Image: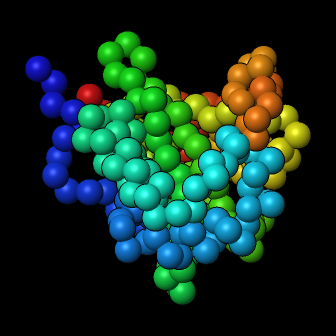
Amino acid sequence: MIALPFFRRDLPSLRGERVALRMPVAGDYREWAALRAESRRFLEPWEPRWASDELEWPAWRQRLARYRDDFNQGTGAAFFIFEIVSGRLMGGITIGNVRYGVAQSGQIGYWIGERYAGLGYMPEALRLVAHYAFDTLRLHRMEAACIPDNSRSIRVLEKAGFRREGLLRSYLRINGIWHDHYLYALIADDPGMTTAKD
């Protein structure tokens, strides 16, 4: 049987030049809730519809449990993004729907607080997570979906090296409406990606 990297007990943390990523913990609640609340109008057009208790403590605990379950089962990994200089929480990024076997792929989703948008933090975070996916998780392909009107997210993906592959019709229900999405992908052997070899 193949031992999957997810089943290690140590939790991943990643460090770049300006950002540090680690898995969320219970003590992040207040900062997370405050950042999401102040950025709500900025984030809602691009996310699934927020629940009425979206920012409350019980929903946060359920979110953490889901993150931990996904990690323990090898189907995903969630990270919070922190600015190294200040230590402040800026956003989040997840690897989800991880598949091994012939696919060896996963999907990336991300968000950033409005005050940090457009400052180059997210492309750096995406590159860190991609290297983690390829080198540690031994994935071959990472995918991201983006609403065609979301020009900010398109720029982020392209800066991080993702390439547009096509249009997915009526792909995800975002803020209560089914939307088409562009499919972007990054492959382990794309230029700029150095991966662990079999």
Taking depth in this image into account, of 186 and 79 the one nearest to the observer is 79
Taking depth in this image into account, of 190 and 153 the one nearest to the observer is 153
In the figure, 94 relative to 19: above or below? above
Number of marks in picture:
0
Q: Where, by quadrant of the figure, is residue 36 drawn?
A: bottom right
On the question of residue 189 being in view, the answer is: no
User: In screen coordinates, is 126 left or right of 37?
Assistant: left
User: In screen coordinates, is 10 left or right of 12?
Assistant: left
Q: Position of residue 69 (x, y in %)?
A: 30, 42
Q: Residue at x 40, y 62 (%)?
A: 24
User: Farthest bottom residue?
Assistant: 86
User: Farthest top residue?
Assistant: 102
Q: Position of residue 194 (x, y in %)?
A: 44, 43
Q: Residue at x 47, y 41 (%)?
A: 95
Q: Where, by quadrant of the figure, is residue 118 drawn?
A: bottom right
Taking depth in this image into account, of 114 and 5 the one nearest to the observer is 114
In the figure, 190 relative to 87: above or below? above
Give the quadrant of the N terminus.
top left
User: In screen coordinates, is 8 left or right of 191?
Assistant: left
User: Farthest left residue?
Assistant: 1
Taking depth in this image into account, of 127 and 72 the one nearest to the observer is 72
Q: Position of residue 83 (x, y in %)?
A: 55, 76
Q: Position of residue 120 (x, y in %)?
A: 70, 65
Give the quadrant of the C terminus.
top left
User: In screen coordinates, is 157 left or right of 94?
Assistant: right
User: Farthest front residue?
Assistant: 52
On the question of residue 126 being in view, the answer is: yes
Q: Residue at x 80, y 60 (%)?
A: 41
Q: Where, by quadrant of the figure, is residue 182 drawn?
A: top right
